[in-house]
Amino acid sequence: MRVGIKVTGQLIDLCQVDHVDVDSGASVQNVLDALGIPARQVGLVSVNGKAVPKAQRAQVTLHESDQMVVMAPLTGG
């Protein structure tokens, strides 16, 4: 199945794809692993506009044509 991907901020340097093809029933974590983005560099993840907490990334399954946004952790001072 195909899932749309948008990465933001400094993660653009690590991942420059607009979609990923994964097995049916893949989780958010499966997609992050497929993208090769180190876990420590992932901040907020959302699917179809809804935030997916870090603790639920392995349990939330994706569906054909879902849109996933991956953002770097927010920093500042």
Image (cartoon, grey):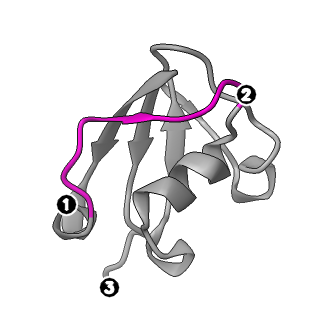
Mark 3 residue type: Gly
Residue 19 counted in the magenta span: yes
Residue 77 is labelled as 3
Vertical side of 2 occupied by 31: above or below? below
Residue at image location 73% in from the left, 27% down from the top: 25
Secondary structure beneath label 3: loop
Q: Nearer the viewer, residue 36 or 9?
A: 36
Does 33 sit left or right of 4 as displayed? right
Residue at image location 52% in from the left, 47% down from the top: 45
Mark 2 residue type: Gly
Q: Which residue is mark 1?
A: 12
User: Residue reaching furthest top?
Assistant: 64
Within 10 Å of disc 1 (Cα), the crowding (few <14, some 14-19, many 20+) is some
Q: Earlier in the sequence, mark 3 or mark 1?
A: 1
Q: Are marks 3 and 2 in contact (CB under 8 Å)?
A: no
Residue at image location 19% in from the left, 60% down from the top: 12
